[in-house]
Amino acid sequence: MIDSNVIKKDFPVLSRKFHGKEIIYLDSAATSQKPRSVIEAMSNYYENYNSNVHRGIYQLSEESTDIYEKTRENVASFVSCSARETVYVRNTTEALNLLAYSLGHRLRRGDRILLTEMEHHSNIIPWQFLKSKGVELDYVKMDADFNLDMEDYSEKLKKNPKIVSVTQCSNVLGTINPVKEMGSLAHERGSVFIVDGAQSVPHMPVSFRDLDCDFIAFSGHKMLGPMGIGCLVGKLEELKTMHPFLGGGDMIREVSYEGATWNDVPYKFEAGTPNVAGSVGLSAAVDYLRNIGMDSVMDHERLLIRETLKLAPEIEGLVSFGPSDPEKRGGVFSFNIGSMPAFRIERELEAGNMVVSGSVHPHDVAASLDQQSIAIRSGHHCAMPLMGRMDVAATSRASYYVYNSIEDVKNLFIALSDVKRLFAR
Amino acid sequence: MSEQDINAEIILDHYRNPHNYGKIANATGSVTEYNPVCGDTVHIDILEKDGKIEEIMFMGRGCSISQGSASMLTDFVKGKSPEEIMKVGDEEYLHMLGLELGPAREKCALLPLNAMHKALQERIRK
């Protein structure tokens, strides 16, 4: 069992007070806070080891290179893959753009890509770029309980998509998708299978080997690490044959005025000076999480979600978006107070809605909770198509991590009952 | 109660009991303005007569700031000429509301003014 009140002490920023109260940070799905060990590891790197990697023939540079490569091994082992399969990128968004660009080279007019209705913009836009080549996109539907409709998935796989790219855990709904099963089905059709692990790798045990996916992408900053470092993990054979993404230093073997040959994997995909301090921070974050144990992390967040779903009905008019079964979801809770459909004048007039509704807008919810020093997110959560699909203009979202306690959840709902009193009309 | 608090109460009161909410059947101009980030929407109908805004109505959905601001705007512009209204800049308008807002919420507050300006510009183009 995790004692989140002990863990909280490792996170300096969580001792900050707003409006006289210590912050209750419930926006870890956007970015997590960083423990002291991560911050110190990074300043230690800059104070004692900073120099460019893979270049210098002097000891400081050799030490820096050694540190950089050791972090890669450490992070790789965290998700059960080899260091050669681990490409450092800025974040999940960059990893998915890399894939769309490089795999996109292989695609032709009429080729299909299969995504789902619950993807983050970063797993939609890069693929939409390929529409100019005549590539077509399909989206797997979700059912009424916010889980993917597996029948619809099987049906859409029959169109033989070249690529299937799916989030393992929705950043809006918390839905955990059966990516292992989905991967096997995709492979039966010869599709390349990609997992967006931005919301899963930080919060549950994830094994690249066990999933048998071709690629998985994740961000360091959502897993207690620094911003600006993340990973694209891919099967070696795929990475070797793929076209490079960014061109520049470090990614080449030989260059002439006429052309170039590429460096080995993973360096082929790491153009320019990498974020070495970031990798050091990520490696320290991985150590921190490993020390807690990813099973414990998952169990803890599930405990918080169970409490959340238990308290939610106490708020009059609260509508929540996500699977009703807490065992099927991560520590993300999206909700609205009252209905919050997108405003369309024709629809309003037709419905005779000449009076205002009793709902509270997510902005007011978030602003009001902020007065209690509770930080939540409000808006479309970079998932506008999903908002449209659910017919909401926006939602509020609380998301949990290891430093959140049951008391935090209880305080959230105490504050929410006040929001209703303040803004209901 | 500080002046800030009083202004916050005023806008909240407009949000709870909006003035001039609805449609104008014979509007001379109308526009829908939308903030994609939060979905705040304001629809404005205006009826111009003898170079003045004779009537204005709005409909919309959004946070207390955007909807309260829309209601206050309708009171403010009634009887004024389009030229007078076009001269009102963002800063002047925010000053009039008298709220201390962060950059995200400033956009909410300014949405109705932007809608109003757009409605007037479109009518000039006609």
Image (cartoon, coloured by chain):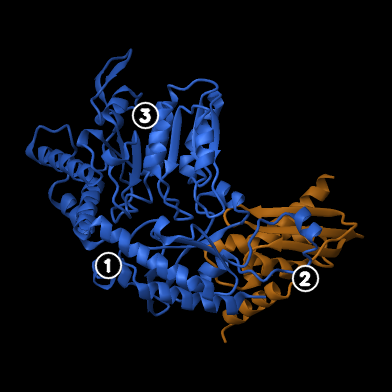
Residue found at the very far right of the displayed protein: B50
- Mark linked to residue A245: 3
Horizontal placement of A391 versus A403: left or right? right
How crowded is the residue under tag 3: few (<14 C-alpha within 10 Å), some, or many (20+)?
Answer: some
Q: Amino acid at mark 1?
A: Pro
Q: Give coordinates of residue A165: x percent, y percent.
A: 44, 37
How crowded is the residue under tag 2: few (<14 C-alpha within 10 Å), some, or many (20+)?
Answer: some
The disc, 1 or 3, on the residue closer to the chain's N-terminal end is 1
Q: Is residue A8 above or below residue B86?
A: below
Q: Report the front residue among A329 and A268.
A: A329
Horizontal placement of B109 versus A330: left or right? right
User: Which residue is labeled 2 in the image?
Assistant: B75
In the figure, the shade used to draw chain B is: orange
Query: What whole-number distance in Å separates the C-alpha atoms at marks 2 and 1?
Result: 48 Å
The answer to the question of whether label 2 and label 1 lie on touching residues, with beta carbons closer than 8 A, is: no
Query: What whole-number distance in Å separates the C-alpha atoms at marks 1 and 3?
Result: 37 Å
Q: Amino acid at mark 3?
A: Phe
Q: Give coordinates of residue A127: x percent, y percent.
A: 49, 34
Q: Which quarter shows the N terminus of chain A?
A: bottom left
Q: Give coordinates of residue B84: x percent, y percent.
A: 78, 61
User: Which residue is labeled 1 in the image?
Assistant: A12
Residue in view at x 30 percent, y 47 percent = A206
Residue found at the very far front of the displayed protein: A151
Callout 3: helix, strand or loop?
loop
Mark 3 vs mark 2: tell me if same chain. Answer: no
Q: Report the front residue among A279 and A147.
A: A147
